[in-house]
Amino acid sequence: MRRATFIAGHIAATRLPAILRGIYPEFEGVAYTFQFAPYFFYWYYPVLAIAGVFLFVPGLASLLDQALPSVAGWAVALASAPAMLAVDALYKARRRDAHRRSSGGRARDA
């Protein structure tokens, strides 16, 4: 029950204002939170990250029987962030190209 409350609070605090104000909630939604209420969100996101560590690490340790990940596990973990950034860049480039085609060649100002 507490996790559901935490998740619902996170969604309401970070995404709902962006949706209500008409901002598409990708990373722009997170960026908007810093403009919307910077004094709250500059503290909120580090606390969210720390909570994530406290919730994630014990479960991961149980899954691994309290052992360190294998070399393959470390490789996957280290490769995941660059892969995610590459996929995000590709998605945004495709979205930008589609927008240019639909708007007659004019690029959208970000």
Image: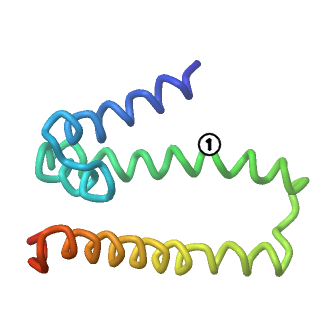
Residue at x 83%, y 81% (from the top left corner): 71
Measured as percent of width and height from the top left, residue 50 is found at: 49, 50
- Identify the residue position indicated by label 1 in the image: 55
Quadrant of the image for the N terminus? top right
Could you say whether the residue bearing mark 1 is in a helix, strand or loop? helix
Question: From the viewer's perspective, is 78 left or right of 33?
Answer: right
Above or below 1: residue 47: below
> Which residue does the image show at 55% across and 22% down from the upper left?
2
- Badge 1 local density, few (<14 within 10 Å), some, or many (20+)? few
Quadrant housing residue 16: top left
Residue 33 percent coordinates (x, y): 20, 48
Question: Which residue shows up at 9% across the image and 77% down it?
Answer: 106
Which part of the image, by quadrant, shows the C terminus? bottom left
Amino acid carrying label 1: it is Leu
Q: Is residue 83 left or right of residue 63?
A: left
Residue at 46% from the left image edge and 76% from the top image edge: 85
In the picture as drawn, the residue positioned furthest to the right comes out as: 65
For the residue pair 67 and 16, the one nearer the viewer reads as 16
